[in-house]
Amino acid sequence: MKKLQGAFTALITPMFEDGEIDYEGWRKLIQFQLEQGISGLVPLGTTGETPTLDETPEEDKLIEIVISEVKAYKEKLAAEGKARDIPVILGCGSNDTSDAVKYVERAKKMGADYALVVSPYYNKPSDEGIFRHFEAVSKIGIPIIVYNIAGRTGKNISTDLLCRIAELPNIAGVKEASGDMNQMIEVISRLGRVKPDFCVLSGDDGLTLPLIAAGGDGVISVVSNLAPAIVTELCETCLKGDFEKAREIHYRLMPFFKAAFVDGNPTSIKYAMKVKGLPSGGMRLPLVEVNDKAKEIIKKALEECNL
């Protein structure tokens, strides 16, 4: 199993103002990401508004498009002698283990390279329940990225528990969005530096530089929906050890790291993309467009960051 490294975009789902999915906009957004050199794509995550999407036909069609576009682009690169991996990490989370298993099976069947599986939310299971949840999805036979985000799930995956989960088959890494740098460094120390194929990816754009500096591998990014080339450059310079240049990029982007979440996610990044003429559009309730104050903050950050 090859270790994931770089910038991976947690894709929005473009919609029209009435909430219907803009499939052509989705295709254009994927092409934009690929042409800008993104390391990989993460469709159907939280940023993609998955809780409000229908499994069939909406999610299935979105998956089909992203898989086909990435395949075609990789074939184009290969023909030009520039072959590289561009993994698709498909969001497969649920707080119902049987549904999570079903989604991971779908990811494998439809050709995704990895499945991103969040810790069960709302239920707040015990550590043993979380372990058994990941044990169930690990049996499907596709690499799994564990997603730890206590702010949304209500339950942190401790490093001890993650180390236990990492011993299961097909566990390829973690998207660490605990927001606790001490925990993230402990994960790198106990897993990222010990298991050669286990990746530690930041779930927070603003922590990309310190995470990689500590030995991590990259980011699953919201900001890269708008600025894939710059976020990719940030990761690449960090991974090369050029931290002087990486700091310049980090501080350039820092105002937008904040603005991209000023009035929620993906509402804030969708508005920023609308300002820059990228496919984004409306949202489905309970999400609504950002407020007027947030709009001004986002516009100002775009100008400050020269985006």
Image (tube, rainbow, N blue to C red):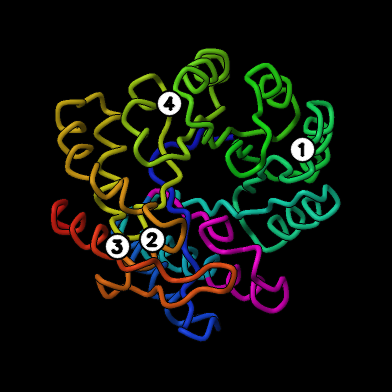
Q: How far is the residue under mark 4 from the one under mark 3?
A: 35 Å
Question: Who comes first in sequence, dot 4 or dot 3?
Answer: 4
Q: Could you tell which of marks 2 and 3 lies nearer the N-terminus? A: 2
Q: Which numbered disc, 4 or 2, marks the residue that appears first in the sequence?
A: 4
Q: Which of the 4 quarters of the picture holds residue 302?
A: bottom left
Image spot of residue 38 (x, y percent): 36, 52
Q: Secondary structure at mark 3?
A: helix
Local SS, label 4:
loop
Classify residue 129 as left or right of residue 189: right
Q: Earlier in the sequence, mark 1 or mark 2?
A: 1
Q: Which residue is mark 1?
A: 124
The rendered magenta stretch, by its main secondary structure, is classed as: helix
The disc placed on residue 168 is none
Residue type, numbered disc 1? Lys
Q: Nearer the viewer, residue 228 or 51?
A: 51
- The magenta span reads 39-65
